[in-house]
Image (cartoon, grey):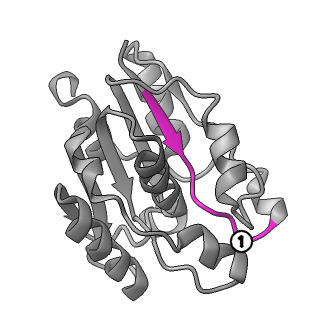
Amino acid sequence: MKNVIIVHGCSSAPEESKEYPENKHWMPWVRDQLIARGIPTTTPLMPESWMPNYEKWKAEFEKQDVGEQTTLIGHSCGCAFLVRWLGDSKKKIDKLILVAPWKIGTSSEEKKRFYDYPIDETIKSRVNKIIMFTADNEERDGKRSLEMYKNALGGTVIELKGRGHYTYEDMKTEEFPELLAEVIPSQI
């Protein structure tokens, strides 16, 4: 059965993490749109998102049902987690969608450990379609991160104008129809 799992990004503080993923950025809108179309969609709350730890995130994520018809969507550091997890697990999935992918951890040793891993280039042989969203006004490190993923995984890059880091503050909307169209193109 086709399903979608959306993994949120990192928060800047513990109190901000309480908003994930129920009312953060575009995630609830995309989830609700997919569910309304009969596609089971989950947005798991990853532990301690202000100080991400791969092993803790992995333990939480592996409660999800991931199979060959699954679409995985990550935002920011959620992309770093999904790419690392796919490299470790060797799972086959249908689509991997990276939104404002990030791979540069600079604020703490814990975050550096979260981001510092070699990208397994064999992921592209186990994923039917890889899509990466960026923006013309994304931060420099975001653009550098995108290049790291693109060089290792290939895939399609979609650059939208004025979306920044794909946060509500940058987008000024919760709606993200371009992402929805990539998940279920024949139904939009």
What span is colored magenta in the figure? Answer: 4-13
Q: Residues within 10 Å of mark 1 (few under 14, many from 20)?
A: few
Quadrant in the picture for the C terminus: top left
Quarter of the image where one finds residue 1: top left
Q: Nearest the camera: 174 or 43?
A: 43
Q: Is residue 70 above or below residue 118?
A: above
Is any atom of residue 156 visible in this view? yes
What kind of secondary structure does the magenta stretch mostly adopt?
Answer: loop
Q: Is residue 174 above or below residue 64?
A: below
Q: Nearest the camera: 88 or 62?
A: 88
Please state the horizontal and vertical placement of residue 29, each as a whole percent of the image. 49, 37
Is any atom of residue 160 visible in this view? no
Please state the horizontal and vertical placement of residue 68, each as a whole percent of the image. 32, 24
Q: Which residue is mark 1?
A: 12
Give the residue drawn at x 40%, y 77%.
142
Quarter of the image where one finds residue 50: bottom right
Give the residue drawn at x 47%, y 56%.
84
Give the residue drawn at x 54%, y 46%.
7
